[in-house]
Image: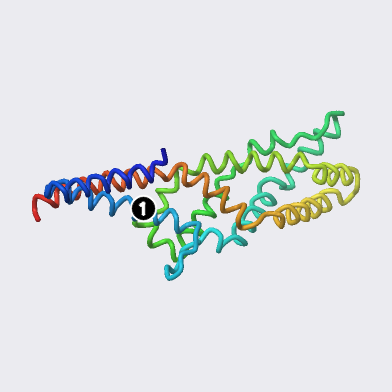
Amino acid sequence: MNKSFATNFIALAVLAAGYQLNNQVLLYAGLFAFSGAITNWLAIHMLFEKIPGLYGSGVIPARFEEFKLAIKTLMMEQFFTDENIDKFISKELSSNQSFDLEPIISKVDLSPAFDSLVNVISQSSFGGMLSMIGGTEALQPLKQPFVDRMKLSLVDMSKTDNVREALKDQLETPEMLADIKVKVENIIDQRLEELTPKLVKEMVQKMIKQHLGWLVVWGGVFGGLIGVLSSFVA
């Protein structure tokens, strides 16, 4: 069962029971639990969906171009560096094996891509609401799943015919290093152009909702505890 739905359902059930039984403890616990859970659910939902009248909602689709630029910068500055290309060429020219970029990709630090995404969110108008659910620290559990997913995507991209041919064609030319980087950058641009805001939103949304669903659960739990305490001082 969906954690967010289950948490909100239980909170409403407790609220209804408190109202029916005229029990102030249950009433306050259900009210505060529902308030905490629904607020956290709305915060997560607003990352992806534009809600009329709520400024800052839909921040990830709205910052789509910045996200693509961060991916390109990451690949060109960490993956296709002069040092990595030199090592790759030396290895491949000395063997008859086909190109395999996966070992290089596995060593690339993709943390800056995740940090860039978090920075975009925190610096947007959504940053204030993000601080209500734990700030940027609440997004840290997503770091490793994001890095793993990005590495798989980079491995898949490296296996395309376009990337392989671009490398092979330039291996023995005097200007091979510069030419390779230009060609690869053009291919990356073309592939990124194939991405749509919807695809990026779905990729990040699936990952974030899977892990941040617990924010809704804990919002309901702590909200309920606050409600119980409030019932004794009301």
**Nearer-the-camera pick, 88 or 137:** 137
Image quarter in which the N terminus is found: top left
From the viewer's perspective, tell me whether residue 135 is left or right of residue 148.
Answer: left
From the viewer's perspective, tell me whether residue 16 is left or right of residue 22.
Answer: right
- Looking at the image, is 193 positioned above or below residue 205? below
- Pointer 1 residue: 40
From the viewer's perspective, tell me whether residue 61 is left or right of residue 224.
Answer: right
**Nearer-the-camera pick, 96 or 68:** 68
Spot occupied by residue 36 in the image (x, y as percentages of width and height): 29, 52
Helix, strand or loop under label 1: helix
Residue shown at 68% from the left, 43% from the top: 154
Residue shown at 69% from the left, 39% from the top: 155
**Nearer-the-camera pick, 100 or 7:** 7
Q: Residue furthest front?
A: 20
Residue shown at 57% from the left, 42% from the top: 147
Spot occupied by residue 82 in the image (x, y as percentages of width and height): 74, 47
> 10 Å neighbourhood of mark 1: few (<14), some, or many (≥20)?
many
Image quarter in which the C terminus is found: bottom left
